[in-house]
């Protein structure tokens, strides 16, 4: 990385990449009085939020494919199975990297179900009445590698 000039600091809004590098250099140098504390704190908080957003996104895809798996068993594909397995593994990895996120998927189920249901209806062309009004799976089931809802094919 190029040497950073800490005499004139970049603005957070002016050049985020340069601002980030400068803030890291200031922290490493122990020059806390020059650190843009408010924006650094905001960025650190956003890092934690991004993991939760990723879990939400993966839960949406996972629930969507579980719904299709359960309510359209005649159209099951290896692609659905692979997607279900991948989402479960990636959520597990996020939780392994940040164990404090372990309870988060349970709080994500209801919101993720709403989006997953909409996508499942669109993709299957089944009527909304073919699906339950609320998520039929618990977070534990959704994340369980051995849970495959619906009839065996």
Image: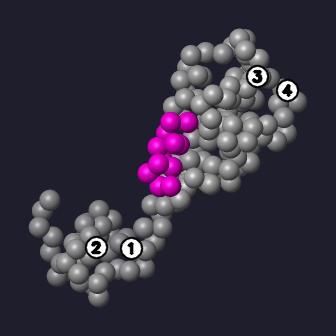
Q: Which residues are magenta?
A: 88-99
For label 1, the SS is helix
Disc 3 versus disc 1: nearer the observer: 3
Asked whether, in this view, residue 16 is left or right of residue 97, the answer is left
For label 4, the SS is helix
Q: Magenta residues: mostly which secondary structure?
A: helix
Estimate the spatial distance between the alpha carbons at disc 2 and disc 1, rounded to whole Å: 8 Å
Residue pushed farthest left? 3
Disc 2 versus disc 3: nearer the observer: 3
Disc 4 versus disc 3: nearer the observer: 3
Label 1, on which residue?
40
**Which of the labelled discs sits on residue 50, or is there none?**
none
Establish if 97 lies above or below 152. below
Label 4, on which residue?
130
The answer to whether residue 10 is seen in the rendering is no
Tags 4 and 3 touching, CB below 8 Å: no
């Amino acid at each position: 990385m190029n040497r950073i000039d800490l005499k004139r600091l970049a603005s957070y809004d002016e050049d985020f990449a340069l601002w980030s590098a400068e803030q890291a250099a200031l922290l490493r140098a122990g020059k806390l009085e020059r650190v843009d504390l408010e924006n650094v704190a905001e960025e650190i908080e956003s890092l934690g939020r991004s993991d939760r957003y990723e879990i939400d996104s993966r839960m949406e895809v996972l629930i969507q494919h579980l719904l299709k798996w359960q309510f359209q068993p005649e159209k099951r594909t290896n692609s659905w199975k692979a997607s279900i397995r991948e989402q479960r593994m990636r959520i597990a990895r996020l939780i392994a990297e940040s164990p404090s996120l372990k309870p988060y998927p349970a709080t994500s189920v209801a919101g993720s179900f709403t989006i997953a249901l909409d996508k499942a209806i669109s993709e299957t062309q089944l009527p909304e009445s073919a699906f339950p009004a609320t998520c039929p799976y618990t977070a534990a089931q959704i994340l369980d590698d051995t849970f495959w809802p619906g009839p065996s094919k």
